[in-house]
Image: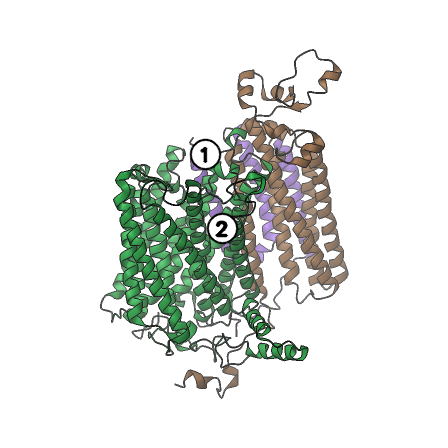
Chain colours: A purple, B brown, C green
């Protein structure tokens, strides 16, 4: 048998309409927040704040719309790990650009 | 121990090795799609890397000034369109899982319509840019239609010498050879001077803008094709409440498209 | 589908073929040509992982032969200073193509595409990979990319008075030359883009297969080290290759649309290209080498008839190499104009990658200790890997250290270094794997004496050629130079003589295998006494679905001394 894992065929986790709508509302709020925040100039904090809000939106989409909150641990670990990798590569590239 | 050649006549037939063709591995397909999403993330990540490298360094003010050319309303509008399409996407999956083929089809259809709306808004945005002579320098047919691109030259030395602020510098009109419009010209003559001047950082900003939103738009179009395929599948009931893996996986792709826009929006439209 | 359970996999499409022949006979078309086409289809349209592995093997060896010929052309041109028989432009294109072919069409697909495809499912007790059709698509993309690369050599030649169209800026395609040159850069770079996707899909397939299709009794820490090597490599393929994808796409966009991203006059930064290029291309060298390390682990354990020493540390070091390898890329860029701070950071990080590699070398040596060593051809090639790759690694230290690197950067020292690691490492591992698994794949055995002679020529020639490069590089000979100062002549000539000897060795080696393929003795079930699943439980050669009975898996992959490892 090529199937080596257990059968989770019929264990389907359905997220309801209500939950989705709630997440959507959160996304709308955060979008409004980021547009409003863009109107306030805090100098060098502008970019980090915008990225923070964007990441919160991304987190909501990942966790609920993309079902990651309910996925198996190994998949969550792989997603986090890959994102971490990209982040480190970014930081190392900035080791050059910020010190020129 | 029996030899290999004899093993295929094993008494216990159940022990025979066989290739399981009928069992689609739901979890495995999902893992495969996630791995593909990682590659997309890294693909766009490379461009975000370039964008950050330029925009947080010497070109910070240039990006700030160039961002004023972008329409926040269209950008925010597109954000809302994509977020809503993500919602209708998960509605479609939930509907199918709960057994409602009709509502699933409705939500997939709305998702497709919203995706096309996104592309339409994008089309108007880009056309507006082209009309203002903002397009990548080498595109022949755009040059033929709208005149020479303002992004063909980067006026950094002139900017440094001019002593003006970036906003003032951008407003000064030049002719096709880059000579600034002198004071006191007649309205007729002023028409020859229809171009603006942009510094290096601003040229990069627009270059990155077209490339990244262009690649993103390309992915939206692919998403539309996939969604049409899903519509067909749900309609013909090859995708059902028991066998919804395809729809869910296309949904994952669609959410990625949304995710990328979630980052594109503040970095281009809100940088001003 | 119906299949015969007891036929070798390369004959098992006979059932399908019989149907096709019958249909053709009814239609009145029964000549040899149509028969041949039908037979060809059962290979070219096959989703069987073993056949796909063979397809890769044939195409890759053909590209390798082309690459070797190009390399030999370089060596002939370098026999004396000045132009011998090709002009500078042609010479530049020769080494560009040599790099592109060897890297993208030989070593990077390398072991995963051939032996990974062939043996990964067997090692984990599965019938195929997770996505067999995607697997075939990977091979199609591989061939498509190769075709496009070939086309870039001559498309547009002569049109508009253009004299030379083949790309000539080196396989690294640095901006701004690549964004402005009047050659077929876009086509060549798009070929590399397609090849990148071929690699990505192979990696995606392997990660999923290893996660989902293992025999229930085979836990993660009971997989053969070859499988672990493929797993680590597959992750690098998935996470790093898209970066070169976007970099190359940006080259094409830059050439076509002039967006300015790498163009300094428009505000771009050419060093950004280098960053983005090497963010992939450094992990890529681990794609070339880690599978080889997996093969060497298998070979050394089998030919010492001993459990591999330190299985856990072997797994961790493999992951460690893959992990650290992501963070060292800018050691290719010390002289590019980066900030001094980042130069220091990357030099520091580069030294870390030597640590897990050393762990592996020590573990291999410890495995050999008190083992019952058989110096059969796979073993001698496997041991050569350890020796040659170690030399490559040691020469890398001078490159990782900034104060020495600025003297040897872009000299033949670098060329020697990467040939020791990529050819003496990755290439030798491919040959070792071929000798190890040849009897299993084809059911035939080759002549050991001839194989040893071939190895001898190769080993002597290789060290002569690349050792001379290390020296002439230290003396100041720059790389990618068509002409050179007279003082370097002797060493270049020694190098070319080495090349002749080495190529003789390669011809003997591959000739030996080719002869064995058609006329060699029938191979035994388990000629080497290996303990992984392909030797005991899978027939020689394998049947279409790999096993007759569900694999028993009552011992570990290195259970030579009765331990479960």
Asked if labels 1 and 2 touch by Cβ distance under 8 angstroms, the answer is no
Q: Is residue B74 toward the left or the right of residue C132 in the image?
A: right
The local secondary structure at tag 1 comes to helix
Subunit ID for the residue under disc 1: A
Rate crowding at label 1 as few (under 14), some (14 to 19) or many (20 or more) other CA atoms within 10 Å.
many
**Residue drawn 60% across and 25% down?**
B198
**Residue drawn 38% across and 34% down?**
C341
**Residue drawn 44% across and 72% down?**
C217
> How many numbered discs, if any?
2
Q: Quadrant of the N terminus of chain C?
A: bottom right
Using the image, tell me which numbered label, if any, was put on residue A97: 1
Subunit ID for the residue under disc 2: C
Q: Is residue C119 toward the left or the right of residue B179 in the image?
A: left
On the image, the x and y values in percent for residue C176 come to 49, 36
Residue C323 against residue C55 in the figure, above or below: above
Disc 2 target residue: C241
């Amino acid at each position: 048998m090529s199937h080596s894992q257990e059968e989770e065929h019929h264990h389907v986790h359905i997220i309801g309409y209500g939950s989705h709508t709630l997440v959507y509302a959160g996304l709308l709020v955060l979008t409004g927040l980021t547009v409003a925040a863009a109107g306030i100039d805090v100098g060098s904090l502008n970019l980090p704040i915008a990225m923070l809000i964007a990441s919160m939106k991304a987190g909501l989409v990942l966790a609920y719309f993309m079902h990651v909150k309910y996925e198996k641990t190994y998949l969550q670990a792989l997603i986090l790990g890959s994102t971490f990798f990209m982040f480190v590569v970014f930081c190392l590239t900035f080791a050059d650009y910020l010190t020129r | 121990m029996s030899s290999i050649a004899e093993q295929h006549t094993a008494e216990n037939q159940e022990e025979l090795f066989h290739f399981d063709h009928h069992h689609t591995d739901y979890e495995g397909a999902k893992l495969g799609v996630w791995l593909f999403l990682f590659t997309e993330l890294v693909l766009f990540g490379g461009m975000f890397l370039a964008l950050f490298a330029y925009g947080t360094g010497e070109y910070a003010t240039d990006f700030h000034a160039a961002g004023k050319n972008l329409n926040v309303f269209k950008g925010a509008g597109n954000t809302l369109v994509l977020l809503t399409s993500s919602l209708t996407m998960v509605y479609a999956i939930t509907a199918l899982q709960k057994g409602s083929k009709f509502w699933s089809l409705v939500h997939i259809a709305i998702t497709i319509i919203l995706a096309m709306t996104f592309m339409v808004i994008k089309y108007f945005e880009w056309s507006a840019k082209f009309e203002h002579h903002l397009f990548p320098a080498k595109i022949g047919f755009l040059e033929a239609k709208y005149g020479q691109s303002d992004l063909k030259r980067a006026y950094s030395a002139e900017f440094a010498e001019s002593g003006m602020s970036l906003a003032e510098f951008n407003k000064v009109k030049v002719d096709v050879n880059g000579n600034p419009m002198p004071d006191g010209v007649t309205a007729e003559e002023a028409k020859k001077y229809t171009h603006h001047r942009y510094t290096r950082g601003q040229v990069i900003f627009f270059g990155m803008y077209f490339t990244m939103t262009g690649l993103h738009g390309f992915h939206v179009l692919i998403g539309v094709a996939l969604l049409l395929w899903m519509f067909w599948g749900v309609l013909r009931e090859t995708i059902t409440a028991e066998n919804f893996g395809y729809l869910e996986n296309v949904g994952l792709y669609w959410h990625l498209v949304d995710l990328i826009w979630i980052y594109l929006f503040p970095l281009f439209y809100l940088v001003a | 589908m119906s299949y015969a359970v007891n036929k070798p996999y390369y004959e098992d499409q006979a059932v399908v073929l019989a149907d096709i022949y019958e249909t053709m006979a009814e239609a009145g078309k029964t000549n040899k040509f149509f028969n041949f086409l039908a037979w060809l289809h059962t290979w070219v349209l096959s989703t069987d992982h073993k056949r796909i592995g063979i397809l890769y093997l044939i195409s890759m060896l053909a590209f390798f032969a082309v690459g070797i010929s190009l390399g030999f052309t370089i060596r002939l041109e370098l026999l004396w200073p000045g132009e011998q028989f090709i002009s500078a432009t042609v010479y530049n294109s020769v080494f560009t193509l040599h790099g592109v072919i060897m890297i993208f069409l030989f070593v990077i697909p390398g072991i995963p595409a051939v032996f990974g495809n062939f043996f990964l499912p067997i090692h984990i007790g599965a019938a195929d990979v997770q996505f067999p059709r995607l697997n075939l698509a990977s091979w199609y993309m591989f061939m498509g990319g190769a075709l496009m690369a070939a086309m870039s050599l001559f498309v547009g030649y002569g049109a508009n008075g253009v004299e030379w169209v083949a790309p000539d800026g080196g396989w690294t395609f640095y901006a701004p030359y690549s964004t402005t040159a009047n050659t077929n850069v876009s086509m060549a770079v798009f070929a590399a883009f397609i090849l990148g996707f071929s690699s990505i899909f192979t990696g995606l397939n392997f990660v999923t297969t290893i996660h989902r299709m293992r025999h229930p009794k085979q836990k993660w820490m009971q997989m053969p080290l070859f499988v672990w090597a493929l797993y680590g490599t597959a992750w690098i393929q998935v996470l790093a290759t898209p970066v070169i994808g976007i970099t190359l796409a940006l080259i094409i966009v830059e050439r076509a649309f002039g967006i300015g991203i790498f163009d300094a006059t428009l505000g771009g930064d050419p060093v950004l290209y280098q960053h983005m290029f090497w963010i992939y291309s450094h992990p890529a060298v681990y794609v070339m080498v880690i599978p080889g390390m997996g093969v060497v682990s298998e070979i050394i354990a089998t030919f010492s008839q001993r459990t591999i020493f330190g299985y856990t540390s072997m797994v961790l070091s493999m992951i460690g190499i893959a992990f650290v390898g992501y963070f060292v890329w800018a050691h290719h860029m010390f002289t590019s104009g980066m900030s001094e701070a980042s130069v220091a950071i990357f030099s520091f990080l580069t030294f870390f990658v030597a640590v897990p590699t050393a762990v592996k070398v020590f573990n291999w040596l410890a495995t050999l200790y008190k083992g019952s060593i058989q110096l059969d051809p796979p073993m001698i090639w496997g041991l050569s890997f350890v020796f040659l790759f170690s030399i490559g690694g040691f020469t890398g230290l001078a490159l990782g250290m900034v104060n020495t690197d600025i003297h040897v950067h872009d000299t033949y020292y670098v060329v020697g270094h990467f040939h020791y690691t990529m050819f003496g490492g990755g290439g030798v591992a491919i040959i070792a794997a071929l000798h190890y698994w040849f009897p299993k794949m084809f059911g035939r055995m080759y002549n050991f004496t001839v194989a040893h002679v071939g190895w001898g020529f190769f080993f002597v020639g290789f060290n002569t050629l690349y050792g001379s490069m290390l020296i002439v590089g230290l003396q100041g000979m720059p790389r990618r130079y068509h002409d050179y100062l007279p003082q370097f002549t002797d060493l270049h000539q020694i190098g070319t003589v080495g090349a002749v000897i080495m190529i003789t060795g390669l011809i003997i080696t591959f000739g030996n295998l080719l002869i064995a393929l058609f006329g060699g003795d029938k191979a035994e079930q388990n000629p080497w006494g290996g303990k992984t699943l392909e030797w005991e439980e899978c027939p020689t050669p394998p049947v279409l679905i790999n096993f007759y009975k569900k694999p028993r898996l009552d011992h570990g992959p290195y259970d030579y001394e009765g331990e479960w490892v």
